[in-house]
Image (cartoon, helix red, strand yellow):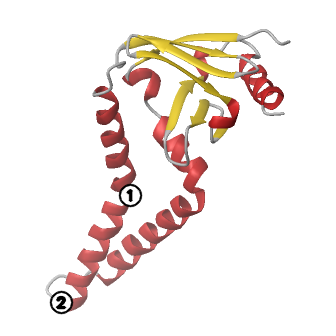
Amino acid sequence: MAEPITIITAFDGKSQHGSFPQHMWHRYRWWVITRSVLCVVAVCLGAYLMEPGTKGGVIGGGLVMVGSLGFMRPMLWQMWQERGLRKHPAYNTKVRYTFSEKGLSMAGSAGEATVTWEELYELKSTKKGLLIYTDKKQYIWIAAAAFGEGQLAKVLGLRKQGSK
């Protein structure tokens, strides 16, 4: 039986910042790439068509505006996501995550929860941390800085052992 791995980390803005782009890139990679290409095309075409005082100038200005707003949209979503986190009862507290062969236990000032590996949708390791999906869109983020040497790989191994 493998030793459980315990991680104690802060649940605050600093630890959670950057989790949303990691989630978007993992979950919606092709949509992010397509949207970015379309935004670049809209801005370039708009700049090409822009001529003051003509119908093309109005259309060009509109394309530049739409392309620019398309680039700002992910930043706005991240701000809304982080704003929602600030409303969470556990915000600005420490949370203890314990990974074992049975699953994941979480404990903090907002309460305690234990989830088996089968109940989790997915675990995704990134360079910046660990995404723990409870369903296709809802995730828990633990920054890589919270893990000790080799612990992240051991967590993924525990999931494989527990899912058998």
For label 1, the residue is: 71
Q: Locate residue 91: give its quadrant.
A: top left
Q: Amino acid at mark 2?
A: Thr
Q: In the image, is 97 to the left or to the right of 60?
A: right
Which label belongs to residue 85?
none
Residue 133 x %, y %: 57, 38
- Seen in the picture, residue 20 relative to 16 is either above or below; the reply is below
Viewer-side label of 1, 2? 1
Where residue 8 appears, as percent x and y from the top left, is 55, 9
Q: Is residue 55 left or right of residue 115?
A: left
The residue under label 1 is which amino acid type?
Phe
Picture coordinates of residue 38 (x, y %)? 46, 71
Give whichever of discs 1 and 2 has the lower sequence position.
2
Label 1 Cα neighbours within 10 Å, binned few <14 / some 14-19 / many ≥20: some
Q: Residues within 10 Å of mark 2 (few under 14, many from 20)?
A: few
Along the line of sight, the residue nearer the viewer: 41 or 143: 143
Q: Is residue 58 left or right of residue 139?
A: left
Determine the secondary structure under disc 1.
Answer: helix
- In this picture, is 139 found above or below 114? below
Residue 125 seen anywhere in this rendered image of the structure: no
Query: Extreme bottom residue here?
Result: 55
What residue lies at 65% left-to-right and 40% top-to-bottom?
122
Q: Pick the residue in front: 102 or 48.
A: 102
Residue at image location 78% in from the left, 23% down from the top: 158
User: Which image quarter holds the C terminus?
Assistant: top right
Residue at 20% x, 82% y: name it: 58
Distance from disc 1 to disc 2, alpha carbons, whole Å, reads 26 Å
- Image side of residue 141 versus residue 89, left or right: right
Quarter of the N terminus within the rendering: top right
Q: Secondary structure at mark 2?
A: loop
Res. 54 mark? 2
Residue 124: image quadrant is top right
